[in-house]
Amino acid sequence: MQSEAECLRILEREWASTCRTVLGGEIGPMEEFSEWLSGLNDPLVMRQGAVMTSNNYCEGAMVQRMGRIDFMKKFEPLSINEMKDIDSLLEAVAERAFFCGNIVIGNSKFVESSSEVSDSFYVYKSVRISGCKNVAHSQWMRLSENIFGTNEGGDTKFCLRCGIVYRNQRSFEIWICGNTSDSYYSYGLEDCSDCIFCFNLIGKSRSIGNLQLSGDKYAELKKKLLAELRSELVKNKALPSLIEIVNQGRADYSEALSAIKGLTYAPRDFDNSKLEEAFTSTSSVVLGAPLKEIDSYAGWLSRHTIVPRDSMSVLSKTELRVSDYPAMKELPGNRLVTQEEALVLGEKLKAPESLALSPSLSNASGILEKIAYFPPERRLGNYKNLVACQWGSESNDCYRTVVASHDKLCGYNAWPRSSENIFGSGIVYHSGFCFKCFDGVELKRCFEVDSARGCSDTWFSHNVEGMKNSLFCFNTKSKRYAVCNAEIGKEQFDKAKKMVQEWVISELKERKTVPISVYGIACKKS
């Protein structure tokens, strides 16, 4: 209780500071705004009093908070009968295994009602937070400070209610913006500052509705608008989101169609050959047998993770990819465009001057009505053969991956950063040759692993660290040749591993799926 009180005390102080910095003044205690601040997040998953990172963990399984777990506890090996066949082994595992909530690792302190938090301080009701300070009601944040109600981003400071931000400062309700500061209710900005109600701009400043203003005029209008935002927040404890405001307006494509007339589109990537080869070779290495034709396993690979799905531009019918990734799933389908189209629209479309020169919440939908177009895809830096991917940067030969960043040969993933040969996985960093791994760092040749760090040749394991050659392990660390948390030696382990591998391959070849996942290993049969 003392830790929670101190966490909330500091966060209330930093909340007030952030409101002064971003909104120009304080608006009241943070907890009065908790429902609104959580509005862009996936619901916080609670099981048996513990915060979990996913709602995929099976109902009824035992859950413990990480602070109560003895990671060095000794477990007796399973009996011969318990390991005689796969059904017996799975039943024995379910009797022993349990999931962990409130996972906090590394140099972290004052973390409350949160999980999957590493090297962070003063974190409250948040998940997947790494290297951060002063974070509340937020998700998927890295290397950031003073973040409230924000879902997904990194290297950012002083943000309120934002979605997918990178290297931004002092902003409110900005979505998918990078290297941008002091901006409000905007989307798709890059290298911008002092923008309000703007869309798809690069290198602009002092703009409202994409209309650039003099410094004095902008400052005058900004001061008036922020006063209105503060007043509404004090009164209603919430404000409409950028998407809600846009959806109030009418979608009239006439000006946008005229703006993109004659636009030359970059060729789409279709060469999937190297990825197919990697899928086959990686399955040989990890599973012990080659699999072919990755799309025939789409259902299994897409399970428990986020992958792109097909859509198209409302202006040109050019194909593009959308997904249920944070913030992305909120984008209105009647305003989706390609990245090339968005850049042209940002240059050519502006709000009516009469509206832009009197910005307020009451006319915000009118300001945005003609300029609000959302590119759900983006390509940055160097890349090649990013087939059916949504975002890509410094990556090669990836397929149906939402965010391919410094990756190669990855397919059907959410976000495998700085990784290679990753398939069917969620958030996985600095890893290689893995299938179906989630919330992992530095994993090698792993299969169905969740919340793991520094592991290799590990299968069906949850909340583990430093494991090598392990099966069905949970809430433990630094073991070798272990099954169900008990070290059994190389010879016995190899027999058990072979049995599990053969079962997995048999299921995949016959049914194109595996009937159990890491999220189900602690589920007892009724």
Image: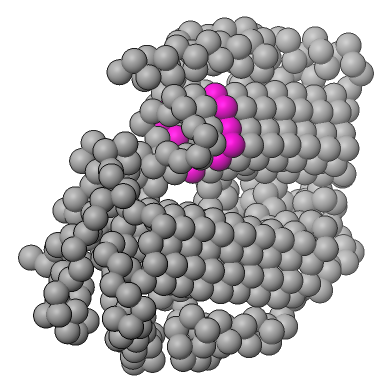
In the displayed structure, does residue 356 sit left or right of residue 252?
Answer: right
In the rendered image, the residue lying farthest to the left is 526
Quadrant containing the N terminus is top left
Name the image quarter holding residue 18: top right
- Does the magenta stretch mainly form a helix, a strand or a loop? strand
* Image x and y of residue 301, in percent: 46, 73
Q: Is residue 49 visible?
A: yes
Q: Can residue 438 be seen in this view?
A: no
Q: Does the magenta stretch include residue 130?
A: yes
User: Closest to the observer: 106 or 148?
Assistant: 106
* Image x and y of residue 73, in percent: 26, 51
Which segment did they paint magenta? 124-134
The vertical placement of 110 against 244, above or below, is above
In the displayed structure, does residue 358 sit left or right of residue 34?
Answer: right
The vertical placement of 78 against 370, above or below, is below
In the displayed structure, does residue 44 sit left or right of residue 522?
Answer: right
Q: Does the magenta stretch include residue 74?
A: no
At x 70% / y 40%, what residue is drawn? Answer: 166
In the displayed structure, does residue 105 sit left or right of residue 517?
Answer: right
The vertical placement of 373 against 14, above or below, is below
At x 79% / y 67%, what residue is drawn? Answer: 383
Quadrant containing the C terminus is bottom left
At x 49% / y 32%, what residue is drawn? Answer: 108
* Image x and y of residue 403, in percent: 63, 59
In the rendered image, the residue lying farthest to the right is 214
At x 73% / y 10%, what residue is drawn? Answer: 223
User: Closest to the observer: 227 or 134?
Assistant: 134
Display colour scheme: one colour
